[in-house]
Amino acid sequence: MGIWPFGSDSKKLAQAPGVIDPNQGPTLVQAEKEFDKRYKRDIWWIEHKEQLRRSGVVFLFVVEALFGLIGVWAFVDYFLIHYVEEGRLVESFFVGADNLHAVVQTQVPRSLEVGEVDVLPAQEGFDVFTLITNPNADHIARVRYRMTYDDRESAQNTVMLLQEATVPLVEFHVAQPRPRNPRVIIDSVEWWRIDAHSIPDPLAWKQARLNVAFTDVRQDTELKIGDQIVSRTLANVVNKTGFGYYDLDVYVVLKRGGSVIGVNRTVLSNLLPREERAFQLDWFGGSPAAQTIDVYPVVNLFDESVYLPSDTVPNIDRRDLLNR
């Protein structure tokens, strides 16, 4: 059998599996170092705790004193140095607010003006009439309205009001019985502000496009066709503008003693630029004798479809050829 030698040159016995070598674990020296660090931190906190507390109190006092000095300086600066200037600044702010309010109010259109509603005898029943006015120079309006009387009412109608324009509102041929308590009900008003960049002067713009003059206006009440009496409104119409229109609505209002006694409507078709023609409006059944005759041409100048093409050539009437 074999013998294991002992001595300085002998090999160490092999370590049995599962046995921990104490030399490979944490040493006592490392544990002592960690304990020493915690100990020194605790000692430092105990020795300086009161000093840190006093330093915190002093810091808070300094901060409060600094804020107090800032408040005192603001008080002195406002009430003793710049009080008058600050007061003027505040007053200017409110004055500016008033000016702003005034400017905003100038942008708001003034309300429409509706005249007294009249009931006028007509050949077939009655006509209900009034005038509506847009007093604004830089706004146009689309108005939807109805006429009401007794327990009846008309269908809803729509009218366009140009800038500073007056337009008749008429419900023709209202049947018997005579309408009582007539009123105009405005269902809605849509406003449009005219762009000052595109149209700097809205009234001059309107005058350049709708300048149709009716001259030598008169009423002929002695015309008879068979057994029927027919009155006529006669005039000369002159289109002083360079614009022509497919259709131009024309309202004729008869007055006597300042009161409206009759109203009628017709359409001028194909009115050419710079054209002059005879105007005639028949009143079947006759018309009352009038002292004043007012004529209202009505067209929506902002609707491009109402204008005749610039190259329109007038049609020659056969009667003109015969006369020539």
Image (cartoon, helix red, strand yellow):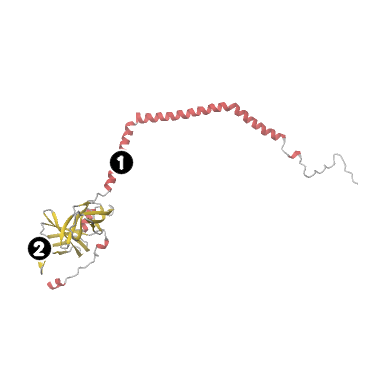
Q: Is 57 located above or below residue 223 in the figure?
A: above
Comes first in the chain, label 2 or label 1: 1
Query: Which quadrant of the view contains residue 146?
Result: bottom left
- Most foreground residue, 126 or 197: 126
Q: Are marks 2 and 1 in contact (CB under 8 Å)?
A: no
Callout 1 amino acid: Ala
Instruction: State the residue position of label 1.
Output: 97
Identity of the residue drawn at 47% across and 30% down = 63
Give the crowd class for mark 1: few <14, some 14-19, many >=20 residues within 10 Å: few
Q: Amino acid at mark 2?
A: Thr
Q: Quadrant of residue 317?
A: bottom left
Q: Nearer the viewer, residue 172 or 164?
A: 172
Question: Where does residue 52 sit, x and y in percent of width and height?
Answer: 55, 28
- Write the residue at 30% across / 41% down: 97
Percent x, y of residue 152: 23, 57
Residue 113 seen in the current view = yes
Residue at 66% x, 31% y is 36
Visible residue check, residue 239: no
Question: Which quadrant of the rendered structure holds the C terminus?
Answer: bottom left
Residue 221, numbered circle: 2
Q: Secondary structure at mark 1?
A: helix
Please give the name of the residue rendered at 24% of the width and 54% of the height, measured from the top-left corner. 185
Instruction: Give the image quarter of residue 28.
Output: top right
Q: Is residue 96 above or below residue 274?
A: above
